[in-house]
Image (spheres, rainbow, N blue to C red):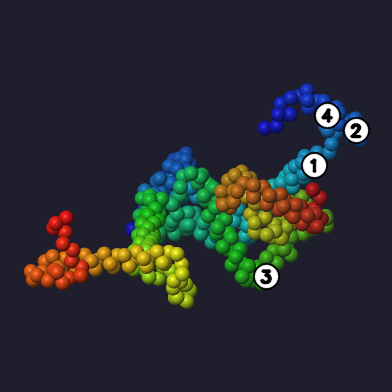
Amino acid sequence: MPNSGKVTSEKGEPHMALEMADDLTLIDQCLAGKRSAFAGLYRRYGQRVRSTLYQLCGETGLDDLVQEVFLRAWRGLPKFRRSASFSTWLYRIAWNVAMDRRKKFARDRQREQTVSDPLDATLPDPSQGASGQWSALHYQDVIRKALGTLSDGARSVIVLCDLEDIPQKDVAQILNVPVGTVKSRLFSARAALRKELERQGVEL
Amino acid sequence: MNRDNQNPKKNESISNRNSESLPFGSFEDLPDLAKTTHQDDRDLVTFLRQYRPEPPPEPANFEANLIRVIAQEPTPASTVVNNPKKAKRWPRIIGAIAAGVVGAGLGHTFGALTSPSGMGAQFADADSDGNFDSNSGANVGRETELETFLENSWDGAIAQTTSTDTSDSSDFSPFYWDTSGM
C-alpha cells in the first residue's frame, strides 16, 4: 500500500533526472509504482493543462480541475496506448474534464453568471486613458468574454489550435473527430470569434 | 493529378488567352481570397496569442498536494490488463459461438418442419387458415406416393406373414403367389 513516507523519500531525488527522461520512460516508472516519476510528468505538462482548462472553463475551481485531470491520468496510465503521444492523451483527459465541468455549469447556468460577473466589472476600459498594462488586461478580458460566447465545440478548437498551438491532427485525436472536421470547425469558430471581437470594439 | 499543372507552356497559353478578356489583366492579378482569409486568420491568431488570458498561478503547495493524493491511489500497475484487445475479444468469440449454435438449432428445427418427409409435411400445404389445398399438384403427387407406399408396405407385411405361417392356408390367401415354379 502506498504511504506518504515513501513519497517524501522519493521527493529527495534530483529533479534533473526526471526532466531528462522522456515521457515513455516516466510512464514505465509510474507503472512500476514510482510516484516521483509522475511528478516529473506533472512538471512537464501541468502548466499547459492548467492553461487549457482555464481557457475552457475559467478560473472557478481551476485547481480542482487540474487535480482531477492528473488523477484520471494516473488511474488511466495502464490504458494509455502508446500509438498517440502522452501529451495528446493528457489533453484529451483535460478536454473531457473540462466538458464535464461545462455540462455541470450548463445545468446551473444562473450560478455561473453570478460567479463570472464580478470579475467582468473589475477590468477598466483602455480607452479611458489606461496604461499599456491595463490595456492588455482589458483585451484579455475581451478575449475571455468572446470565448464565452462560443459553443463548446468552437471554443475547444480555438483554445487548442490557436491559443495552445496544438497541431490540427493532434486536436483531431483529442476531440476524436476527423482533421477535416477540425478545419471546418476552426473556420467557423474564427469567423464567430472575429465577429464578437469586432462587436466589442476590437479592430483586427 | 492535374496534368495541366505539369505543362508550363500550356498554362502560360491559358493565362495569356484569358488575360486578354479579363479586365484586371491576368490570373495573377485576381484578388486572392484564400490569402485574404489566411491573413485575417493570422491577424486574429496573433491577437489571441498576444492577449491570451493567463491562468492564475498555481498555489505553492499544489504539486505536493497532488502527489499526496496520488499516494493514496493504488499503483497503476496493479490494475493493468495484460492485453486489452484480447480481453475484449473473448466475449465476442463466445457470443459468435453461441449465436452459431442457436442458428444451427433453429435451422435444423425449421428444416424439419418444412421438409416433405418431416413432421411438418402435413402442414406444408396448409394455407393461412390451416386448410389444405387438395387441388395443388404437389399435394396430389404426395398422396399418390403415400398410397403407393402404403400398398407396398401392406403387400410386404402380408407376404411376410404368409411365408412364415406354418399352416397350409396359402391356397386361400388372395395375396399369396406361388413363385416356386417360376
Image mark for residue B15:
4
Rate crowding at label 4 as few (under 14), some (14 to 19) or many (20 or more) other CA atoms within 10 Å. some
Q: Chain of mark 4?
A: B
The residue at 26%/64% (across/down) is B152
Q: Amino acid at mark 4?
A: Ser
Sequence-wise first label, 4 or 2: 4
Q: Secondary structure at mark 3?
A: helix
Q: Amino acid at mark 1?
A: Leu
Q: Chain of mark 3?
A: A
Rate crowding at label 1 as few (under 14), some (14 to 19) or many (20 or more) other CA atoms within 10 Å. few
Circle 2 residue: B21
Q: Give how far apart the Cα atoms at labels 4 and 2 are.
A: 10 Å
The residue at 33%/58% (across/down) is A1
The residue at 56%/62% (across/down) is A100
Q: Chain of mark 1?
A: B
In the image, which is nearer the foreground, mark 2 or mark 3? Answer: 2
Quarter of image, res B143? bottom left
Image mark for residue B33:
1
Q: Amino acid at mark 3?
A: Thr
Q: Position of residue B40 (x, y in %)?
A: 77, 45
The residue at 89%/34% (across/down) is B22
Q: Are marks 3 and 4 in contact (CB under 8 Å)?
A: no
